Image (spheres, coloured by chain):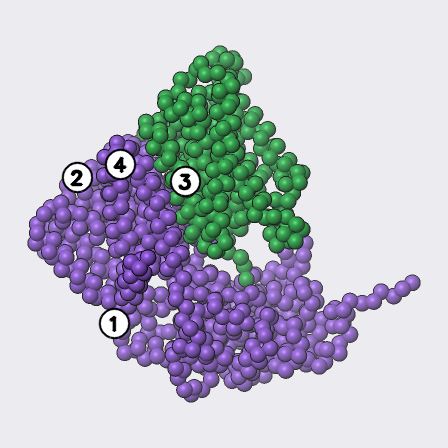
Amino acid sequence: MSAGLILQSLVAGASAGGVYALVGLGYGLIYRMSGVLDFAHGDLVTAAVFAFLLFVGGGQAVALTGIAPPVLLGGAAVALGLTALLAVAVQRVAVAPFLARGSAVGWIAATVAAGLFLRALAGLRFQAESYTVPEILPVGSIGHGGVLALPGGGVVEVRALVVLAVAAIVALAFDRWLVASRTGRAMRAAAEDEEAARVCGLSPERLRLVAWAMAGLLAALAGLLVAPSRPLTLDLGVVLGLKGTAAAVVGGLGSARGAVLGGLAIGIGEAVLTTLFVPALHLGALNLPQLGPAPALQDVGPLLLLVLLVALAPRLVSGAAEPLD
Amino acid sequence: MKSVGVWRQSFSDLRAWALADHVPWLGAAWLVLVVGILAAGNPALTSTAAQATYLLIALYALQWLVHDTGQPSLGHAAFLAVGAYATAGLRLRFGMDPALATLIAVIAAGACGWILGWGATRLRPAILALMTWAFGWTVFVAIGAFPEVTGGVAGLPLLGPLSVRIDLLGVLTRFDAAGHLVLGTVLLALVLVMYRSAQMSVIGRGWAALRDGTSLATSLGYDVPSIRRRTFALAAMTAGLAGSLGAQLLQLVDPTLYSPVRSLDLFVAVLVGAPLGFLGPVAGAAVISGLPYLVDRGFEAAGLPLGAGRELTAAALVVVALAASVTFQRRRRRQPGTAPAAAPRPRPAAPVSVRSGSALLEARGMELRFGAVAALAGATLTVRAGEVHGLVGPNGSGKSTLLRCIAGTLRQDTGNVTLSGTSVDHLGEAGRVAAGIARTFQRTAVMPHLDLVAHIEVGVRERRRHAHALQALLKTPAYRAESLAVRRAALDLVEMFGLGPFAGAAPDTLSSGRQRLLQMATAVATAPTVLLLDEPSAGMSPDEIELLHAALSELAGAGLTIVLIEHNMRFLASLASTVTVLDQGAVIAEGSPAEVARDSRVRAAYLGTVPVPG
């Protein structure tokens, strides 16, 4: 396997991993703030992308080029804002009432339902099998039609580099915000000990809403970054959401830096799996039956990893186990 | 408004009736219905009925998992998928005998459940739900990702109907829709009989303990990890069987039947049916089958996409289910005073007394570090048989840690624990309960879904010898006699701990002091030789402390050995014959309460030393 191909899959993997990290950051933040797993998180990603399409194309098939940049950026802003609001709505409607009653089954079922509801709403307006999403940033004009040559013979899409850069900047900013800002500190305090935070004059309820809104923003950003690269279906978000969950879980659910590392690990892992490992299997003397197109493993792999991690190594997930007596 | 009241009343009546033991009548009604459908000979109707029986089989297994053992499975359709696809794969690729293929598929589904249950041992319900939800999506995504194996969206055809060949008898049975209906009915009856009888047996008590918190269950001697693995595997196998047979009935493995939305439907069916108890899955099945059908027709008429309709329906169903469970979930609280009459107390229920005076429990050289903190630094505790032994010390001195190590909840780094001269270090928490070491927690923990007597009976489980599923089902004389004895013992304990006036109440409606009394009574019910109590009087009112004092005195008088962490020195001094004082993980004094109170090191540990000015 050539060094160029390895570098190529590493860059592509890190780029995908950056997106998972964004989803995982929000997911982990919600978990840390209130011990809630947001089963609707992936559908927030979906909602963001369809909100963007709705703004840009009014629900019709969207041309890939020729849309004025201000419209694209406006659409992105609307999608981000709307998703933050949707996330807050999920918290208020599907989580808070059940959290107050101490009914875990309640908020589990309600967040799943909220996710389905969002998907169904999008599905009512967007009835085709899949949609294409225009690039928001002008990445196609750089290099040879948006592709750069890598040293060693590989190639990389400019958009992968841009996505990686945006994800890295946002993740770093998020981390700084959580560590250094007033709100970030208050949030970490409230996550640590709600009662003590209340005594200090903080409002855990308000901070929780901020956390949900922030998670919604991150989810929307992840969706907008990834959507132009592939046909958009209603299932995009769920799978992305679960991969983000996997990233958060690999990084020890609730830790921001852990989620970023987890996202990168999963992104690179699946890229290596699909571009290097699976073809090697097919080419080798093993003569395995055709396992289907390599990209298929890209989705199944991380999901399976999530299931097995939680099933076989629950200690990795902080707070997953019941408290010791 | 009046009609709502009437509806509600009739619902309550129906519910009360279903919760009472009318199951045989319902079974008979179902049989009549099946015979009627068979006699009508309408293939479509027969096929639908057969599908319904398979759905019910899967739902009862899920109800058991969710309600009886408290493990929310949000990916149950995936187990059905494993059963269906494994059957189809084995039959199509290897031309395997249908019955054998079905069997292997069931085992494959069970294996998936076993692996998921492996991690479920100490997981909070929410994480468990996440794991099963992710499993459901993994299977669904895999179905789409490997069309060569799974047939993709088109699904897989099955070659020929399910057939069973019994070579010895020279019989070959092919199953048409009617055959499936009969098979499904027989299997459903089997599943229900097993479910019901297990529910009434000691096994069911184990579920109840598991549902309300694994720590408490473990402290009462239940091997929680193995119960969880087994329940998950069994529920998955049942679902796999339903999936396999359902696919063979349809002659098609249809991927839409195994989507995560379908998983949610199944979960919702169980939630919706919850207020109806044993009848729940029937009602749930009707709702999740009927409503989508109506919505489909509506969406078809309006020219809207059916997929969105299914999702909207599923979401709406969740709302209905949650509303139903919020309205009806809280069981009616029985009023205090409706307690069953306590049996006359022939003798204290206190268990075996061991020859007093000799060392019964010893923990030697116990060391345990948490990172840089030495929680235990060589503490040694010797408890003689029949004594009440106090354990005191300032906060953070390692008292609770020592008790947890003795009970097996924590493992010491070095040191060893012996009971009657035999090491118990190799035993887990549950094993030590069986060996005779019972413990209560520092926090208050009760099982809210059982009344007081049933709560205490959970503790007796390990002593029961005649309450296996079959005996429970047949209500054998030995089972009845033992049940009566257990009930008497539990009532005795209710009286001993002064809980008589509350015997019919739900445990979580009691004051926290009374909850702690209940917790202790349940621990005593495990018939320990040593009872470890972690601050039993914390948060108790004066009259509750009196009750506690009386109960402990009675137990001690009957020869039970008790180790007691206590801050209330007057309370301790009136009970304990020996007191051990811990500070910073080591023993600094030991002796009678009076001796210990005079010890200067003890005073220093509690009050601090005054630095000499200079």
Chain letter, disc 4 residue: B
Answer whether residue A302 is visible to the viewer in this image.
no
Chain letter, disc 3 residue: A
Does residue A175 lie above or below B474 as drawn?
Answer: above
**Mark sitting on residue B159:** 2
Mark in front: 4 vs 1: 4
**Residue placed furthest toward the right:** B614
Dot 4 or dot 2: first in sequence order is: 2
Marks 4 & 2, CB-CB < 8 Å contact: no
The residue under the point 10% across, 53% down is: B38
The residue under the point 66% across, 79% down is: B570
Answer whether residue B610 is visible to the viewer in this image.
yes
In the rendered structure, which amino acid carries the disc numbered 4?
Phe
Chain letter, disc 1 residue: B
Marks 2 & 1, CB-CB < 8 Å contact: no
Quarter of the image where the C terminus of chain A is located: bottom right
The residue under the point 40% across, 48% down is: A109
Is disc 4 surrounded by few (<14), some (14 to 19) or many (20+) residues within 10 Å? Answer: some
Residue that badge 1 annotates: B474
In the rendered structure, which amino acid carries the disc numbered 3?
Gly
In the rendered structure, which amino acid carries the disc numbered 2?
Leu
Residue that badge 4 annotates: B299
Mark 2 to mark 3: distance in Å? Answer: 38 Å
**Mark sitting on residue A115:** 3
Residue B86 placement (x, y as % from top left): 27, 43
What shade has chain A been given? green
Q: Which chain is purple?
A: B
Mark 4 to mark 2: distance in Å? Answer: 34 Å
**Residue placed furthest toward the front:** B1
Does residue A73 lie above or below A116 as drawn?
Answer: above
Residue B399 placement (x, y as % from top left): 63, 67
Q: Quadrant of residue A301?
A: top left
